[in-house]
Amino acid sequence: MDYTTARANMVESQIRPNAVTARRVINAFDEIPREAYVPKSVQAIAYMDEDIAVGKSEGATRYLIQSMVLARLLQLADISAQDVVLDVGCCLGYSAAVLARLADAVVSLECDEDMAACAGENLVTQGVDNAAVVTGPLNQGYPSQGPYDAIVLNGAVPSVPKALLEQLKEGGRLVAIVSEGALGRAHLFVRHGDVFAERIAFDATVAPLPGFVADTPAFVF
C-alpha cells in the first residue's frame, strides 16, 4: 500500500474540493500518516472518504470521522499556533496528531482507557510531543487543564453540554456536529463573557460520540 500517494489523493480529492482553503489545515492533513492511527486490520482503507470503525467503547462502535469533515471543523475553529485545544473523543490519536500541528498544546480526551493508552502510544511513536491523552467522560470535558482557546468534538452529539462550553476562554471557539435525527450540521460556538454565540456552518453526518444526551443548549442566543 502506497500510503504517501493515498494521503495526497485524500487531500486533493476529499479536502480541497470541499471548501477547505486554510493552508495550515491542508498541510497538517498532508503530513500526518492517518494509517498510523487505525488498527492494522483497516490500514488499507485508512484514506477512504467515510467514517472508519476503529474499535468499541461503552457498548458502541467508535469511528475515525471523515477527513473532510474533520478538516472543515478545524478550519471553522480557526486554530492558531498559540492555542491550547481540547480534543474530545480522540479514539486512537489521529485528531490529536493533526491538532498538534496547528496548536501550541493539545489535551486529548478519551472515555475508553484502552483506546486512550493506544492513542498515547501512537503519538509517542510518531514523535508528537505537544499532545497529551487523558481519560474521562467525554461530555464533561477536562476542566483541570482549561480554559481552552478551542474545543473540537470528534463526532456527532445531540446538543453541546454547558460543561463543555464553560471550559472556553474569552473568545474561545467550540466546533461540533450537532445531530437532528439522521441529519447533522456543524456548529461554531464563540464565548463572549457569559454568552455563547452560535453559528451553523455546514451540513455533515458523522458517527455519534458516546455519553452525550439531548439537552437544551446552554447560553445560546
Image: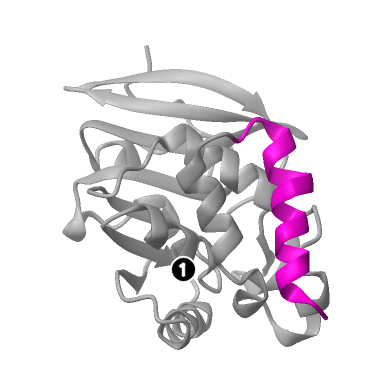
Q: What's the residue at 71%, 59% (across, down)?
A: 8
The residue labelled by disc 1 is: 111
- Residue 99 vs residue 3: left or right? left
Looking at the image, which residue is at 55% across and 64% down?
A: 31
Q: Would you say residue 26 is visible in this rendering?
A: yes
Q: Is residue 65 above or below residue 117?
A: above
Quick one: 128 or 154, which is closer to the camera? 128
- Residue 34 vs 78, above or below: the answer is below
Q: Position of residue 109 (x, y in %)?
A: 40, 64
Residue 7 painted magenta: yes
Residue 77 screen position, x and y as percent: 42, 36
Q: Nearer the viewer, residue 38 or 153?
A: 38
Mark 1, secondary structure of its residue: loop
Quadrant where the C terminus is found in the figure: top left
Q: Quadrant location of the N terminus?
A: bottom right
- Quarter location, residue 33: bottom right
Kind of residue indicated by mark 1? Cys
* Main SS of residues in magenta: helix
In which image quadrant can residue 219 be found? Answer: top left
Which residues make up the magenta segment? 1-20
| Residue 97 located within the stretch drawn in magenta | no
State whether residue 65 is above or below residue 205: below
The residue at the far top in this view is 221
- Give the residue displayed 71% in from the left and 63% down from the top: 7
Residue 194 or residue 107, whichever sits in front? 107
Q: Is residue 215 left or right of residue 181?
A: left
> Dot 1 surroundings within 10 Å: few (below 14), some, or many (20 or more)?
many
Identify whether 4 is placed above or below 21: below
Residue 156 seen in the current view: no
Image x and y of residue 146, in percent:
19, 52
